[in-house]
Image: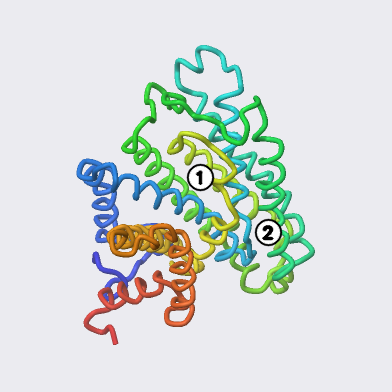
């Protein structure tokens, strides 16, 4: 009864569409929660917590890209712009707004700034999603690229970064980021915030995809003309997808400032937009699992590559000077390798492995 789908089938519609369909899956998710929220933070040192935070940040950023590309069929190459909008909105609200004393004492400024950053990034994404009503494919790619260059290279660099006469960066002194009485001033506390946000956004997106809205997005992805013929308002749902993707990107950017001593435009380059697209290509397009697998793969591989280069620095010191180029080359090779040998991504291989065990002994 606990191993679906071989042998036991549901008798009610609610059972068939449950998020966790069997006792076996519920136990797995409980064990995963115990590991993420209890065992790992107790065991991990600062280095492993830093790597985990980077993985979580990549997941938060890639969820919106997966929604647009994987579930709505809208190609984007400028998603880092919306992360930047979220980060700068949260930073400005925390540093520049004269909050009432009771809000500062209660540590409410940063939580309010996260919500405001999400809406600001969502509305900014909606603005650049307007051309999706008229164009698609290559032309939409150019539009989203324009979002990156207009937002980060022009608006933020030339204007937003100059607020307060701070030059290019906003300093975030220790103790600036607070939630209630909880000051987020070390990697362990950043990790717990990351784990909470990843859990909330993942559950929100999974349930949204199971709703009428999610089914409309998938219909548009598969065939927008057929979807419109069936009565789906294609323009409205495309714009909603851009808003939700930007909303999640804003939360990702607002989270990331808790891990930084200063915020600058260099934290949101165009290469980060390409990185997020590469994450879902490697993890699997159109799969929530793919976001996690792709993020883990890319971050862990780059960390291993960094350790390998550092270990060889004594013999080949020029490698250390070219570390960024080595990483970029590895990123390109990983994309090419997956497109050639595993075009459906790691999530597809994971799906095959699950089917093998779920259908055993009839897995053939």
Residue at the extreme top of the image, as rendered: 101
Q: Nearer the viewer, mark 2 or mark 1?
A: 2
Q: Residue at x 72, y 49 (%)?
A: 150
Quadrant in which the N terminus is drawn: bottom left
Q: Position of residue 171 (x, y in %)?
A: 52, 30
Marking on residue 54: none
- Residue to which mark 2 is pinned: 145
User: Sequence-wise, which precedes: disc 2 or disc 1?
Assistant: 2
Q: Position of residue 138 (x, y in %)?
A: 71, 70
Is residue 227 among the parts visible in the rendering? yes
Say whether residue 181 is left or right of residue 162: left
Determine whether, in the image, residue 255 is placed left or right of residue 219: left
Q: In the image as oriented, which residue stretches furthest toward the right?
A: 134
302 vs 209, nearest the viewer? 302
| Rendering quarter of residue 294 | bottom left
* 250 shown above or below 68: above
Q: Estimate the x, y position of residue 280 in percent, counting from the top left.
A: 49, 64
**Would you name the residue on which mark 1 appears?**
252
User: CA separation, marks 2 and 1?
Assistant: 19 Å
Q: Which quadrant of the rendered structure holds the C terminus?
A: bottom left
Q: Nearer the viewer, residue 134 or 47?
A: 47
Do the numbered discs 2 and 1 sit on residues whose CB atoms are within 8 Å?
Answer: no
Visible in this render: residue 15?
no
Q: Please state the horizontal and vertical placement of residue 19, each as a whole percent of the image.
A: 40, 57
Please tell me whether mark 1 sits on a helix, a strand or a loop. helix
174 relative position to 314: left or right? right
């Amino acid at each position: 009864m606990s191993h679906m789908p071989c042998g036991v089938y549901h008798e009610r519609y609610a059972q068939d569409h449950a998020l966790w369909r069997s006792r076996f899956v519920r136990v797995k998710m409980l064990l995963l929660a115990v590991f993420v929220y209890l065992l790992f933070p107790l065991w991990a040192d600062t280095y492993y917590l830093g790597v985990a935070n980077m993985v979580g940040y990549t997941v938060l950023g890639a969820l919106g890209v997966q929604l647009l590309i994987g579930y709505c069929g809208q190609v984007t190459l400028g998603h880092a712009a919306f992360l930047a909008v979220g980060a700068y909105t949260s930073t400005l609200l925390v540093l520049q707004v004269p909050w009432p004393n009771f809000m500062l004492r209660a540590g409410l400024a940063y939580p309010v700034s996260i919500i405001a950053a999400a809406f600001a990034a969502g509305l900014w994404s909606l603005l650049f999603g307007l051309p999706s009503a008229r164009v698609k494919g290559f032309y939409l790619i150019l539009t989203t690229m324009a979002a990156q260059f207009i937002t980060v290279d022009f608006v933020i660099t030339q204007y937003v970064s100059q607020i307060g006469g701070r030059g290019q960066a906003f300093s975030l002194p220790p103790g600036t980021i607070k939630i209630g009485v909880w000051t987020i001033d070390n990697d362990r506390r950043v990790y717990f915030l990351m784990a909470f946000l990843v859990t909330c956004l993942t559950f929100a997106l999974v349930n949204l995809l199971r709703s009428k809205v999610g089914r409309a997005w998938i219909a548009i992805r598969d065939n927008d003309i057929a979807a419109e013929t069936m009565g789906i308002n294609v323009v409205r749902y495309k714009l909603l997808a851009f808003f939700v993707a930007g909303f999640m990107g804003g939360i990702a950017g607002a989270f990331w400032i808790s891990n930084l001593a200063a915020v600058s435009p260099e934290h949101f380059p165009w290469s980060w937009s390409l990185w997020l697209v590469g994450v879902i290509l490697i993890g699997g397009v159109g799969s929530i699992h793919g976001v996690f697998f792709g993020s883990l793969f890319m971050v862990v591989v780059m960390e291993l590559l960094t350790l390998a280069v550092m270990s060889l620095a004594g013999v080949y010191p020029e490698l250390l000077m070219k570390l960024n180029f080595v990483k970029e080359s590895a990123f390109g090779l990983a994309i090419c390798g997956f497109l050639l040998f595993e075009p459906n991504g790691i999530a597809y291989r994971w799906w095959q492995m699950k089917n093998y065990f779920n259908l055993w002994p009839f897995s053939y």
